[in-house]
Amino acid sequence: MSRDIQAAFVKSFPDGPQIRVENLRTAGPASTTVLFGASGSGKTTVLRCLAGLERPEEGEIRFGEELWFEAHRNFCMSPQLRGLGFVPQEYALFPHLSVGQNIGYGLRKVTRQERATRLTETLRWLGLEGLERRRPGELSGGQRQRVALARALIRRPQLLLLDEPLSALDGPTRLRLRGDLRLLLKQLGIPTVLVTHDRTEALALGDQLVVMDGGRILQQGQVHEVFSRPVNLATAGIVAMETVQPAQVVESTEGLVTLIAGQARLISLSPPLAAGSEVYACIRAEDVILLKGMPDRSSPRNCLSVVVVDLTAEGPIMRIDLDAGFPLTAVLTKQACEELALQPGEKLTALIKAPQIHLIQR
């Protein structure tokens, strides 16, 4: 039986924004769908509507064969009957209860033996053994996150909803637990909808990405496809496409589009476009290859002479701003920058494969 969400609804707030969701779908029984966008884009409201904590004014929500909400029949299934696990942004643990009591709080209508068995399994599964008697205030941020997940999972939900599950953690803990959470979600095999505004988390945790802005869905699809091939300028901005350069098509032949961007000539693998068409050329920084001198042989069709304008450290990588006849951004590891002895004014060659230049029509 299908365990996918199918939803289209409208949720309005007095003197506030209107959230209008059209054709939201998840894909696959063990997939993680990420609701992605800036604060205020409507992500958490969508999550709460799926959970039954907010009631839309229009539309319907289905999970597999189950009808959860239908406006014209005035039907709304209660959150308790939807069989889901919900983890809010701040975890909402009871400070006066122990870890064991917090985890087992939502477990109802099971025998004492079944309750003890599930609690033992869940504690072991999430690495919380030995912490059963501690209070939330005695735990680290990572431990509190796992307790909140355990409380949601002990009920064996058919759908897991996570609202910014790592945002309350410090940077090093968030980095460490990101991989743990991805592995856990895959092991669970439970369809998951996760809210985040963090690009790295979306890439690390998601299978499917739903980009939201102003209460609307702008684009949805496979994570890497959406990040690499945004459908419009707004989506390109939200997914932080590093280079978005206005350009004009010169010719289009045999699946290759030649265009002028600034003072440079580029070739993109793209559907045919009429000569004179105005487009945006979108290039991910990680798709730009930098080297000194000219390559002996190169499969990329774009070989650009560039000058280093600036270098900026961003954690373990360096952001390199380039003049390629238009502003171009690349990223390298700090070690690679040191090996190339990069500094402002340095002349380099930038290689970009034709399929990695994505065009958005203006």
Image (cartoon, rainbow, N blue to C red):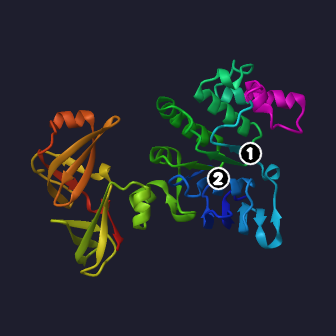
**Range of the magenta residues?**
95-121
What amino acid is at disc 1?
A: Pro
| Amino acid type, callout 2 | Pro
How far separated are the C-alphas under marks 1 and 2?
13 Å
Residue positioned 59% across, 51% down in the render: 31
Name the residue carrying label 1.
Answer: 157
Q: Nearer the viewer, residue 4 or 34?
A: 34
Quarter of the image where one finds residue 148: top right
Residue 132 horizontal/vertical position (percent): 73, 21
| Residue 238 in the image, given as x and y percentages of width and height | 44, 57
Image-based side of 33 in relation to 331, left or right = right
Q: Residue furthest front?
A: 15
Number of numbered discs visible in the structure rendering: 2
Q: Is residue 110 magenta?
A: yes
In the image, what residue occupies the spot 77% across and 26% down?
96
Residue appearing at x 49%, y 44% in the figure: 201
The answer to whether residue 83 is above or below residue 231 is: above
| Labels 1 and 2 touching (C-beta < 8 A) | no
Residue 65 in magenta stretch: no
User: Taking 108 as reference, is 132 above or below it?
Assistant: above
The quarter of the picture where residue 8 lies is bottom right
Instruction: Say what secondary structure mark 2 lies in.
Output: loop
